[in-house]
Amino acid sequence: MIQLSYLDYLAVERNSFFHRLSPEVKIIGMIFVLLAIVVLKSLFGFFLLYGILLTFFFLSRIPFRIFSLTLYPLIFAVLFIFISSFQIHFILLIFLKVLCGSIGVVLLLATTPYPLIFSTLGRVLPSPFVTALFLTYRSIFILLNILEETQHALYLRGGFQWRHPWRSLINISNAFGHLIIKGIDASEKMNESLMLRGFKNKIYYRGRS
Amino acid sequence: MSHIHLPDGVLPVWLWASGYIVAILVGAILFRWIKKEELTRRFPLLGMMSAIMVLGAAVEIVPIAYHVNLTVISGILLGPSLIFLATLVVNLILALFGHGGMTVIGLNTLILSIEGILGYYLFHLFYRVLKKVAPVTFGATFIALLISTLAMIGVVSLGTSHYKELMHHQEGGIFKFHLSQEEEEQHEGERMEGEVNLRRFVSIILPLGFIGWLLEGLITTLIGRYIYRLRPDLLNLEKEIS
C-alpha cells in the first residue's frame, strides 16, 4: 500500500504512449482484459494475453520495481490450489488469471492519475459511490502520513517482535487505535472544510491543468 | 480469510453476477434509509474508516496468509447502513491491488458487510448484558468472523461444478498433445483422483481461520479498549447505558 503514492507519482510524472492515452480507452481496455480472463479457458490464450500485457507494461516505461506488485496476488491464489488436488493445468490457469488481472490493473494505475479514473467512473457509477471512493483514496494518503509519525512511537515501544507476541499485539492494536482516532479527527476537519465549500455529496473534477 | 481471494474467471458467471445484483439491491435499500444530510455529514468518516480497512488489509500476517479486516470495528463506528457502502469501496480498492478479482467484488461486499453489520448488532447486544467493552468486542468480532467465513465457504462451494469444468478442460491449439493409449489410461486414473476437493479446502481454511479470528478478535478488542479510553463517545454506548 506504501507503493500507492509512488504509483500516483508515476501516473502523473512519466510520459509514454500509455500515459497519453485517454482514461476512457484504458478503462475499456481493462474491461476487455477482465472479459478475456473470464472467457478464456486455454493456457495458450492466457500465455498470449500475459505476453501482450507484459509488453505493454515495459513499453509504458514503468520501473521494474513496480513489477513485483503484480506478483503479490499470487499469495492468495496459493490457498485455492488445495481445492484442485494439485493439478498442474488448473494451477497454471489460476496463476495466469491472477497475473493477467494484476498486471492490467497496475498498468492502469501507473499510467492514469486517480482523479481521472474516478471522474471517468463517475459518468457510469452513482455519484455517492464515486465520492466515497475518492474520499477513501484521499484518506489513505492522510493515514499514511499519520502512520509514518506513529512508526517512531511504535519503534520506541518495542515495535513488532516475534519474541514478545503479546507486547507486539498491543503495540499494533494501539497503533491502529491511534490511527483511527487521528483519522476520525482528520475526517471531522475534512467535513467542516467540505461544508464550507458547499459540498453536496458530489466531488467535481476540473480536469488536467 | 473471511472474504474471497479468488481471481477473476474462477467462479461461475451466474454466481458472481448474482453477487453483484444482490449487492446492488441491498445497497439501494440501505441507501434509502440514510438521510441525505447524515450522509453528507458522515462521508469523510466513511472515507476514513474505509481507508483504515484498506490499510489493515495491507498488513499481512505471513505464515497464515491472513490480514486483518477491521470490518467489525468499522461497523461499530459507522453503523450498519454506512458499513455496506464502506465495504463496497474497500473491496473495489482491494481488488485493484489483487485481493480477489474484480468480478467477485459483489460477493465480497456481501460477505464483508455481514461481518460489519453483525459485528455492530452483536457488540450492542452483548454490551447491554455484560457492560464491559473488552469481552464484548472480542465476542462480537469472533462470532461475526466465524459466520462470514462460513458464508465465504458456502459461496465457494456453490461453484464446484464450474471448478470441475476448469480442471478437466481439454487444451486446444498448440497445447493439444496426442497421447498414446497407455498414457490416456494413466491420465484417466489421475483424473479420477483429481476431483474438486472442497473438504481439503475447508480443512485448511477453518484451522487457519480460527487463528485469524483469534488474532483479529484480540486486535479489535485492544483497538476498542483504546478508543473507549480516549474517545468513548465514538462507540455510541450512551443508549445502552441508559
Image (spheres, grey):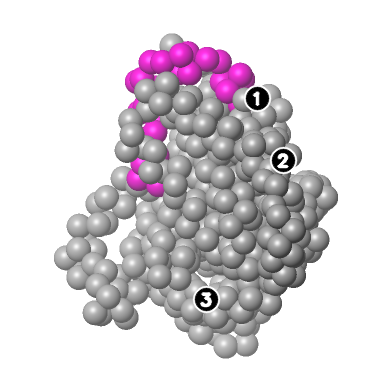
Q: CA distance from mark 3 to mark 2?
A: 38 Å
Quarter of the picture holding the C terminus of chain B: bottom right
**Mark 3 residue crowding within 10 angstroms, few (<14) / some (14–19) / many (20+):** some
The reply to whether residue B84 is in sight is no
What amino acid is labelled 1 in the image? Ile
Mark 3 vs mark 2, foreground winner is 2
Q: Label 3 vs label 1: CA separation?
A: 38 Å
Residue B49 percent coordinates (x, y): 51, 53
* In-front residue for pair A121/B197: B197
Residue B158 point in image, percent of width and height: 79, 63
User: Which mark, residue A28?
Assistant: 1
Range shown magenta: A1-28
Q: Judge if badges 1 and 2 mark residues of a common chain.
A: no
Viewer-side residue, A137 vs B233: A137
Q: Amino acid at mark 3?
A: Leu
* Residue located at (45% from left, 71% from top): B64
- The residue identified by callout 2 is B172
Residue that badge 3 annotates: B208
**Label 2 chain ID:** B
The answer to whether mark 3 and mark 2 are in CB contact below 8 A is no
Q: Chain of mark 1?
A: A
Q: Secondary structure at mark 3?
A: helix
Could you tell me which secondary element the residue under label 1 belongs to?
helix
